């Protein structure tokens, strides 16, 4: 059956419009808001070594300031190790001071006396040898007696040279290398003692930030391992929320952009800052081909707020108004 000419003309004009509507309707609508849950920045504090809790000074909900003592831990060998380190420091320092001062007067006098005694012995053996040599020449004494006198003279001369060298070294004092070694030993002992003190100080947990105790995870008498959280401190003044947006919203968002937010049932508008945008999509289907499947691509966006009034409580849902972008 033939279609009238005026109906064919109307169909040619209507068909492109219908196709454009269908294509436009196939793309999902881009939302202007996103909903997230408020969280707060939390810091976990715990001992850096295996230790037993002696005292816990805070309760959940307490407000603390930087430097406040939260808990005190101890180890069985803490006092003994500290005493050993302090004794090692004293020993190394005394040894260094002794080398710096050099020989004591009594040591110098003794070395000088040894030299005088050696000189006297050399003179005696030399005199004995001088007296025996003429006798040996006439045959009044045996050859063995002369050899013994000569050996005694050589021995006393060698001993005299040795004690003279000892006196020189005593007067000169220790070598510079020994002084440097003693100084290095003293520094090492001080460093070891400082490390022990640092470990002891780490057993006293103090607040690194101002905030509120959100979790008390230890009681007196309990033993904690390194890395375990004994106390958690939250910062209500630094709330944040993570929202998830589609790939169609993502081009509108940039790090550092300012966004506005509202709590449920609250008309007050608060400002936040985009602190992070995920570089990888989440909840992604195995093969994203269709328009519907591409709409499932979601990217996490972290929004940070500054709330000195502490009204943005952790756990509350918050609605984020997304920027509309350029028309």
Image (spheres, rainbow, N blue to C red):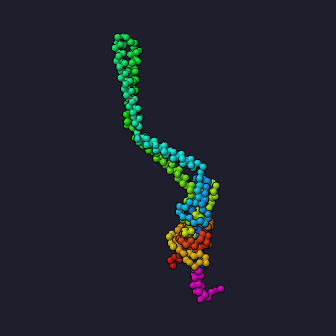
Residue 61 x, y percent position in the rendering:
61, 66
Describe residue 46's horizontal placement relative to residue 104 as left or right: right
Residue 134 x, y percent position in the rendering:
34, 14
| Residue 15 magenta | yes
Residue that appears at 55% across and 61% down: 68
Based on the displayed image, in which of its 4 quarters is residue 215 positioned? bottom right
Residue that appears at 46% across and 43% down: 94
Q: Quadrant of the N terminus?
A: bottom right
Viewer-proximal residue among 101 and 70: 101
Residue 131 x, y percent position in the rendering:
35, 16
Q: Tell me the magenta residue range.
A: 1-21
Q: Can residue 245 be seen in this view?
A: no
Does 107 sit above or below residue 82? above
Describe residue 222's horizontal placement relative to residue 269 as left or right: right
Describe residue 274's horizontal placement relative to residue 179 as left or right: right
Q: How many marks?
A: 0
Q: Can residue 7 be seen in this view?
A: yes
Residue 17 x, y percent position in the rendering:
57, 82
Based on the displayed image, in which of its 4 quarters is residue 282 positioned? bottom right
Does 209 sit above or below residue 106? below
Residue that appears at 53% across and 74% down: 271
Does 155 sit above or below residue 225? above
Viewer-proximal residue among 287 and 4: 287
Overall secondary structure of the magenta stretch? helix
Viewer-proximal residue among 12 and 140: 140
């Amino acid at each position: 059956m033939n279609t009238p000419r005026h109906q064919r003309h109307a169909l040619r004009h209507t068909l492109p419009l219908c196709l454009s509507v269908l294509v436009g309707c196939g793309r999902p609508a881009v939302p202007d808001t996103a909903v997230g849950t408020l969280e707060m920045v939390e810091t976990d504090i715990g001992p850096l070594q295996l230790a037993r809790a002696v005292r816990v000074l805070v309760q959940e909900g307490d407000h603390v300031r930087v430097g406040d003592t939260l808990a005190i831990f101890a180890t069985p060998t803490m006092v003994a190790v500290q005493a050993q380190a302090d004794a090692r420091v004293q020993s190394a320092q005394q040894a260094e001071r002794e080398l710096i001062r050099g020989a004591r007067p009594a040591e110098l006098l003794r070395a000088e006396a040894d030299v005088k005694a050696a000189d006297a012995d050399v003179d005696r053996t030399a005199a004995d040898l001088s007296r025996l040599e003429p006798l040996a020449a006439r045959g009044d004494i045996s050859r063995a007696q002369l050899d013994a006198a000569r050996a005694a003279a050589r021995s006393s001369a060698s001993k005299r040279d040795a004690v003279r060298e000892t006196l020189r070294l005593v007067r000169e004092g220790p070598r510079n290398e020994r002084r440097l070694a003693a100084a290095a030993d003293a520094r090492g002992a001080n460093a070891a003692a400082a490390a022990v003190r640092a470990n002891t100080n780490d057993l006293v947990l103090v607040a690194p930030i101002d905030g509120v105790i959100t979790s008390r995870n230890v009681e007196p008498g309990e033993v904690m391992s390194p890395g375990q959280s004994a106390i958690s401190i939250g910062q209500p003044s630094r709330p944040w929320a993570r929202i998830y947006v589609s790939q169609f919203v993502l081009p509108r968002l940039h790090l550092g952009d300012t966004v506005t937010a509202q709590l449920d049932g609250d008309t007050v508008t608060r400002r936040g800052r985009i602190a992070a945008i995920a570089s990888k999509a989440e909840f992604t289907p195995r093969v994203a081909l269709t328009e519907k499947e591409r709409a499932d691509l979601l990217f996490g966006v972290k929004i940070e707020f500054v709330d000195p009034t502490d009204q943005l409580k952790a756990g509350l849902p918050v609605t984020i108004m997304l920027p509309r972008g350029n028309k």
